[in-house]
Each structure stands twice: as C-alpha cells, then as structure tokens.
Image (tube, rainbow, N blue to C red):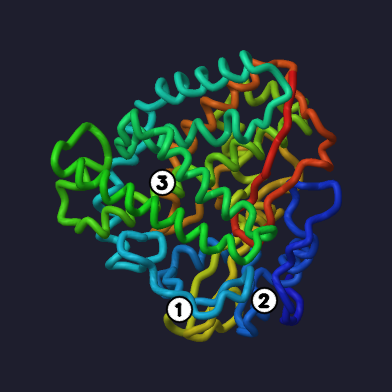
Amino acid sequence: MTEPLTTVVSLPTARPAGCPFDPPTGLARIRERNPLTRMIFPDGHQGWLATGHATVRAVLADPRFSARPELMHSALADLGQLPPAPPGAFLNLDAPEHTRYRKLLAGKFTVRRMRLLTERVAQISTAYLDAMARAGGPVDLVAAFAHPVPALMISELLGVPEADRDRFQRLVADLVGQLNNLDVMPDGHVEQGLITFEETQEYLRDLIAAKRAEPTDDLLSDLTATNLADVELAGVAALLMIGGFETTANTLTLSTFALLCHPEQLAALRTDPDRAVEELLRYLTVVHTMTRSALADVELAGQLIKAGETVALSLQAANRDPAVFDRPDSLDLRRNALGHLGFGHGIHQCLGQQLARIELRTALPALMARFPTLRLAVPADEVRMRPDGIGVRGVRRLRVTW
C-alpha cells in the first residue's frame, strides 16, 4: 500500500557507509512509500522519480516517454539545456529514427552471433591473465584486465586494424578516464576532453573511409554497405565504442570486487556462470539511473505525469524491489535473477547485452580459476569508487594480489 504522495527534494546519492554495492540510502524508503513520486531536479524542474520495478519497466516500455536529451532534465546535475543527439547516437533517439538504426544493427548482435565470439573472449582473457601472472601482484585489475578485455573485443568487432589497436584502446581509455574523474578535474581539463573527442571522431572518419575503400569482415564494413552517411557511421561507431566498453569494464571490475568481498559465492560462479552473471548484473546495476520525458499526459502508478515532465528512473532501486526479488539486498549467485533491468528494457534495451554476457561469463571464471587465491591488496573501504553523478557505477582502481 502506498502512502500519500510527497515530494523528494533531490535524487538520493549518498550510499551507506561500508556498503559500496548497495543503492543510496533513502531509495528503499521512497520505493516503499510510492513507486512513483514527485522529485525536484537539480535545475529546479518538478518531475518524477520512479523506484518500483514495475513502474520503471512500464516507463521504459511506453512510447509516450522520450529518450531525446533536448526534451529532458538531468536528475544527476544541472546541465542546462541539453543539445539533441548527434547523428548516429540512436540511444538518445525515439522511433522512427531509433528504429532505423536499430534494424540495421540488431542482426549483428544476436545471441547466436555473440556465442561464436566466446572462444575469442577466452583467448583475449588468457592473454591478459598471462601478462598479470608475469608481472606479479599487486596489480590494478582495472588497467590490467577489466579495461583491456572489452576494449580489445569492441575494437575487433568494429574492425580496427591490429596496428591501430593500441591507439584505439588509448582513445577509449582517455575518453572514459575523463568521465571517471569529472568530480576532480579542473575546469581547464574540459578542453582536453573536447580534444580527445575530436581525435576519436577523426580516427573513426579515417577508419570508415578505409572500410569503404577495402571492406573487411567486421561490423563497420557491413554498415558501410547500408545507406548511412559517414557522419552517421561515425556516431554509431562512437556509441558502440563507448557502450561496448564502459558498462562491461565496470561490471567486470565491480563483480570481482563483490566476489572478493563474498568469497562464499565463488563456488556458484564456477558451477553456473550464466545464472551468476545475471545476479551480478542485478545486484550491481552499473547503469544506475536513466531519464525519460513524457510526450503526452500519462497515468501511471496512480499518478498523472503531464506532457513535458521528466521522470528519473532508478534502475538500482528497481533491481532491489522486494516485490520482484526475494532478499533483494543479498548477493546470491544461485538466484534466478531473470527480469532484472540491468540492461534497461523496451526498444532501448542494451543492444550489446549478449556480448556483455559472453564477456562476463567467460572472463570472470577465467580470472578466478587462474588466480584461486586472488584477494584485495587494500582494505575494502579504501577502494575508490567513481562518482555517482556520471550515471555509471564503477571503481577507479582495484588493487589485487594473489
């Protein structure tokens, strides 16, 4: 039973001390009172906060809610008026524009196609684990394993030539690294971020030109045979480049951190990695908050959301909803966590989710099997987390040894 509607003055972001994997304190209480409640956004907009699993899922599935950034207000910071999505950035487009891009890409990311990559993920994982063994501990798992494995996979998927892969991985690392340190970067570093972005775009434009001239067996070459313009191809490639790396790398790092804090769960990872990964995706919810804007008046969860109002979607609160998951705040790798919203839902559900699953199901067990005595090299409370204001949960560095 819900309580009378109240207004949340801001999105809760303070996580409980000593519990780096738990959602911010206050989200559970808000969800218990009302799965959909009024919230004041950082720029003063009076919108909504959805915390219940059914409510978040309903918004993500409803075409009356837009993903276009220029129509919405940020729940995480006062960013002012956001510009429209650039060409190719289909994650921030609505149908039918979104549909046009999605149809061109969906067939490239099927379960069957992604399963064919399992052996390659295993080879890449082994190569980086061998390098870790040669270097000896302690190492930063982020730099030594969690970042390079998905970065190399996405570079191969896009068809980045082997001679360019060091540069490509540096570009990915630089872009994500600047996001990773937004809360500590001087204002002057914003200019460096723009330089890195332009360098990335320049590289992608050159790569597209090369693929048009001499296509190879890769995703980007396939896309040059479509009716997409070069500027659209560069936008799609940039989105896949970041999307195919950012969430997987952070899930891989956070999963390792969580497992080292819950060693009793390791047996379940070995016996059923598929089920274990789904639970880690639910429990960690790396992409913790999304936003949508109402295109029309919508009645939902007993409330009227008016056209033009923004709804903040707390995926982390939804994935800890006791109405859907028993003992939701416990990590249980034997749980059937299907139905979680770790990859979103609806037409914008993560295009690369099957690739992410393959990488996690392969790389995590390989890491734990190669280093059965793996442990944190620093106390758990000294592990530096990324700021939640970015929208993607993660770890800056994870020092481990064995």
Mark 3 surroundings: few (<14), some (14-19) or many (≥20) residues within 10 A: many
Q: Who comes first in sequence, dot 1 or dot 2?
A: 2
In the drawing, does residue 47 fall left or right of residue 139? left
Q: Position of residue 245 (x, y in %)?
A: 48, 42
Other residues around mark 2 within 10 Å, as few (<14) / some (14–19) / many (≥20):
many
Compare residues 285 and 371 and report the one nearer the observer.
371
Q: Distance between the residues labelled 3 and 1?
A: 25 Å
Residue 159 in the image: x percent, y percent?
Answer: 30, 36
Q: Mark 2 points at which residue?
A: 37
Residue at the location (20% across, 41% down)? 211
In the rendered image, the quadrant that contains the C terminus is: top right
Compared across the picture, whether 313 is left or right of 401 comes to left
Q: Name the residue under label 1.
A: 71
Vertical relation: 202 (above or below) 48: above
Residue 219 seen in this snapshot: yes
Q: Quadrant of residue 143?
A: top right
What percent of the width, then of the height, locates residue 74?
A: 57, 72
Separation of disc 1 and disc 2 at Cα?
20 Å
Query: What's under tag 3, amino acid-wise?
Result: Met
- Residue 208: x and y, percent? 24, 47
Residue at (62%, 35%) from the top-left corner? 142
User: At label 2, which amino acid type do we have?
Assistant: Thr
Q: Residue at x 57, y 48 (%)?
A: 177
